[in-house]
Image: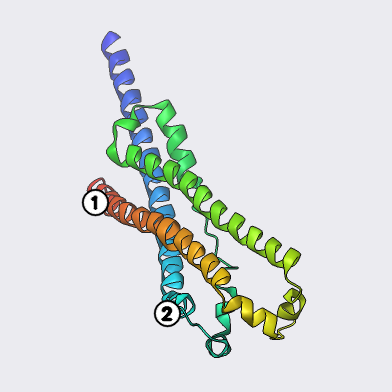
Amino acid sequence: MVIGILIAVSINNANERNKEKESFRATLQILKNDLVSDTTKVAGLMEYYKSRDSLYRVFLTPGVTEEDYRRSPMGFNLALTYNPISLNRKAYGLLENYAAQSDVLNDSIVSESIELYLSSYQQLEDNQGRIARDIDQHMADLSNNETWVIDMMRGKLTDPMMDYFTGKKYQGKLFLHVQYVKGNLLRQLFLFKLKASDLLTRIDERLNTEE
């Protein structure tokens, strides 16, 4: 009788361990999917800003001319636009819940993934918030102080407008924008991609080992 009970308990414990193992494996797969999705988005955004490098150089060069803007109209928008990005939260939420119910935080993949996403969410909010506020302030400054803004919206080039965009004031604002984008945002995204790629390699190894 006692032996039978012990065997039943042992079988039940083994079943529970198998369930936990399968649940953790499913969570790792979701984490992998999120990391693949996020690194793809990050790589695309980095490529987008890399394609702007030549424009940044042109319009930050002293002596930029109206002809430069006519050749590359995107110059007008360089300091007034940006592409926001967001990171997935599904796997992070699952890992947090999973970690709260077990000793899984002892797993380096889990602890490093939680740390990576938690810090990245905050840094991304800070960096993109800084860029958005800078653009909003720039637009408000133009709307409140420059009479040619309506002409710009209509695609009409006027002398006062070109004086602004070829002047030091706009170049100063563009320089600050580039620092926010390349010095802060892209540096953060590069480090995220680097760490995420390492985690993906280790997750694949873990999933293949446990098959």
Q: Is residue 203 left or right of residue 166?
A: left
Three-letter residue code for mark 1:
Glu
Q: Which residue is mark 2?
A: 54
Q: Quadrant of the N terminus?
A: top left
Q: Residue at position x 49%, y 51% from top?
A: 124
Residue 98: give x, y in percent of width and height.
43, 33
Asked if residue 126 lies left or right of residue 206, the reply is right
Q: Is residue 57 above or below residue 169?
A: below
Three-letter code, disc 2: Ser
Instruction: Judge by depth and name the residue closer to the eye, 19 or 80.
Output: 80
Q: Does dot 1 land on a helix, a strand or a loop?
A: helix
Q: Earlier in the sequence, mark 2 or mark 1?
A: 2
Residue at the image point whose x is 63% and y is 82% from the top: 162
Q: Give the number of the disc on residue 205.
A: 1
Find residue 23 and report its horizontal and vertical position in percent.
40, 39
Residue 88 in sight here: no
Q: In the drawing, does residue 118 fall left or right of residue 8? A: right
Of the pair 168 and 6, the residue shown nearer to us: 168
Q: Position of residue 79 (x, y in %)?
A: 56, 68
Look at the image and tell me whether residue 124 can be seen: yes
Residue that lies at the very extreme toward the top in this rendered image: 2
Q: Residues within 10 Å of mark 2 (few under 14, many from 20)?
A: few
Query: Above or below — where is 43 with respect to 33?
Result: below
* Front residue (pair 14, 141): 141
Q: CA distance from mark 2 to mark 1?
A: 40 Å
Q: Foreground residue, 156 or 114? A: 156
Residue at x 52%, y 59% (from the top left corner): 85
